[in-house]
Amino acid sequence: MNVRIEPSWKKVLQTEFNQPYFKKLTEFVKKEYISTTVYPPPKFIFNAFNSTPFNQVKVVILGQDPYHGPNQAHGLCFSVLPPTPPPPSLQNIYKEIKSDIGHITNTSGDLTHWTKQGILLLNATLTVRAHQAGSHQNKGWEQFTDAVIKVLNQQKTGLVFILWGAYARKKGANIDRQRHLVIESTHPSPLSAHAGFFGSKPFSQTNTYLLLNGHQPINW
């Protein structure tokens, strides 16, 4: 497995990599990739970190599980590999961008252009068995990504955390609201988007806050 994590993240997360739980997680994940089909491909496990170095993070969007179908997951929450079309939740995200901002610059399912502007697209769990949603939950990934949120919360100021749905809101419950902007709503899934996601204007809120804190706004 050719798995690498960007140096600035490796530095701030070094204590996690040395923890017993992470070593146990690593062994589990290695065995899974050997014995069955697992997504994303190994090179994309830490894609969120490799695409957005620690010192460049301005916005954090929290997801839950990677997509579990072929040619979908590539280590960025809500994002899919081309030419896979945008899944339903991402379609709703695009609808809200257009309603909120007035236009949209990207219509593919690939959100890599967000990561290059300082958006960390972080799933709570970084791997999953093919066609088995949640199959790698409670193996250690959640502890690792909790540590990611904690280090961002403590070592940075003026970040925007976007928490969609009950799971993300619970995971982000300890974020310091005095140091950072936390935007919460229901999930963009078709099951819940009409119950508070549509009309929540997270994208304009993010850009207003970034400008007030001396950062470039996001080109959504």
Image (spheres, rainbow, N blue to C red):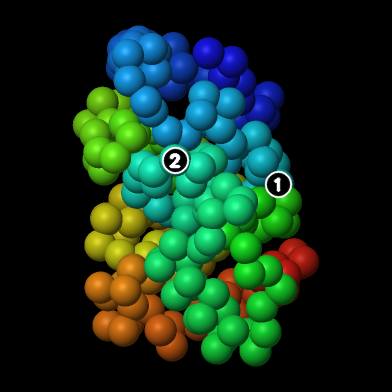
Q: Residue at x 51, y 81 (%)?
A: 95
* Residue under numbered circle 1: 56
Splitting the image into 4 quarters, where does residue 107 fall?
bottom right
Q: CA distance from mark 2 to mark 1?
A: 30 Å
Q: Residue at x 38, y 28 (%)?
A: 38
**In the image: residue 88, left or right of residue 110:** left
- The amino acid on which the numbered mark 1 sits, given as a three-letter code, is Gln
Find numbered disc 2 in the image and state the secondary structure of the residue it sits on: loop
Q: Residues within 10 Å of mark 1 (few under 14, many from 20)?
A: some
Between residue 70 and residue 93, name the one nearer to us. Answer: 70
Splitting the image into 4 quarters, where does residue 31 fall?
top left
**In the image: residue 75, left or right of residue 150:** right
Q: Position of residue 209 (x, y in %)?
A: 62, 73
Q: Residues within 10 Å of mark 2 (few under 14, many from 20)?
A: some
**In the image: residue 162, left or right of residue 133:** right
The label shown at residue 154 is: none
* Residue under numbered circle 2: 70
User: Is residue 42 visible from the viewing direction of this image?
Assistant: yes
Q: Position of residue 174 (x, y in %)?
A: 34, 52
- The amino acid on which the numbered mark 2 sits, given as a three-letter code, is Pro
